[in-house]
Image (cartoon, rainbow, N blue to C red):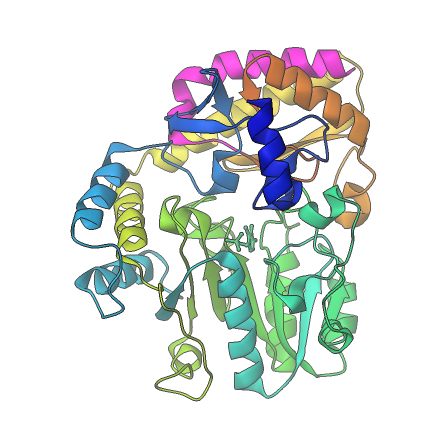
Amino acid sequence: MSDRWERALELMPGGVNSPVRAFQGVGGRPPFVSSARGPYLRTVEGEELVDFIASWGAIILGHAHPDVVAAVVDAAARGTSYGVPTLGEVEYAEQIAGMLPHVEMLRMVNSGTEATMSAARLARGATGREVILKFEGCYHGHGDAFLVKAGSGAATLGEPDSPGVPGGTAATTRIARFNDLDSAAAALAPGDVAAVVVEPVAGNMGVVPPEPGFLEGLRSLTDRHGTLLIFDEVMTGFRVGPGGAAGRYGVTPDLTTLGKVVAGGTPAAVYGGRRDLVSRMAPTGPIYQAGTLAGNPLAVAAGIATLRRIERDPGLYDRLEAMGAETEERLGAALRRHGIDGTVQRVGSMFTVFFGPKVVRSWDDAVTVDRDRFARFFHAALRRGVLLPPSPFEALFLTDAHGDVLDGALGALESAIGDAA
Ligand SMILES: *Cc1c(COP(=O)(O)O)cnc(C)c1O
């Protein structure tokens, strides 16, 4: 297959369609995948890998879940796109709004990037202000306004900020420190901030949970300054619980962005929130945003099938939580056993093994990780048949299909930690 990889490198930057897939953070070249089922990816060489990438969190039921496959196949047979309303879109919107009561009205888009860009435009249009406040190390897609100190992807490549973002746009993005309310208060003080956008559980600098009071503090600060609060739940939505991070921590944002799990591994995403805000989008309001493939019937079918399954299986998040707890405990114990400084940080079924820092509260801590040790850990895991995200600044994800393979996979990761010592 090396000739295929050469061809990929000739035709696509880094051989890939999203930078972190290229293994530049760990060395070597990625496998080509031919299929996936349950917790496994199968490579074109026929090797089965236990998958902790899970499409960067989009897969929660396991790969090729029968409900999702059946829904997509059925939808495809009825046509792949119409550009005319469907009943499925109404059903999908009802499903999402039913599970997330603070999402009173919503719009479907095609990627998490589009969801956050659109939410920012809505916030700016609704408040008449231009500044967006984000937190260092949080990633909100590759929209110009967000590509400033944006965590994993750029950091893996050693490019903290991207050329091509106009200076004027970057100037409307203000930065604060995650888990640091004082820095947020200072950034909000001028009274010119349209919205604070935050990953309520940071997942794109590795998993960094919000400290008690952080999200509540953002809520009261934004209220005080007439600023909107946007929870970017593209990663956490339907991942850390059926109500996402808003439900888990009991803090209600004005606007929410969803992606990944919401579309069951198909290319779709959502933004939504307060009706008085979202109704200001065209055609009921003046703020423009549109999409040829938005509300695509294949994505809607996959999304409905996934969310229904989640809603009808009350034990799902308990199983994910139990698997997560076992993972955290065993890998944390392995670090201590091998005398390696580091920590395992986790919320629900998303976690990161940090080599180096004893605790990671913000990007300042995350950036101190031992990248070489992570690369050794990564390759030792891969040799043992376990695929991890190829960067020290990413979250690993469990799916409901990991149950049967978890013990063996954790054994492999414990050994890999030993190899990295
Ligand atoms: C993945 C992600 C995005 C971007 O979504 P894409 O579908 O990759 O454009 C935005 N925000 C967060 C929190 C994410 O994890």
Quarter of the image that includes the C terminus: top right
Residue 303 % position (x, y): 31, 50
280 vs 102, nearest the viewer: 280
Left or right: 144 in relation to 83: right
Residue 57 screen position, x and y as percent: 49, 41
For residue 234, side relative to residue 160 (left or right) = left
Magenta span includes 415: yes
Q: Nearer the viewer, residue 376 or 16?
A: 16
User: Residue 286, image x and y in percent?
Assistant: 44, 89
Q: Main secondary structure of the magenta part?
A: helix
Q: Looking at the picture, does residue 403 appear above or below residue 194?
A: above
Q: Is residue 166 above or below residue 386?
A: below
Magenta residues span 397-421
Q: Residue at x 42, y 84 (%)?
A: 280
Q: Is residue 182 above or below residue 367?
A: below
One can see residue 395 in this view: no
Residue 129 in view here:
yes
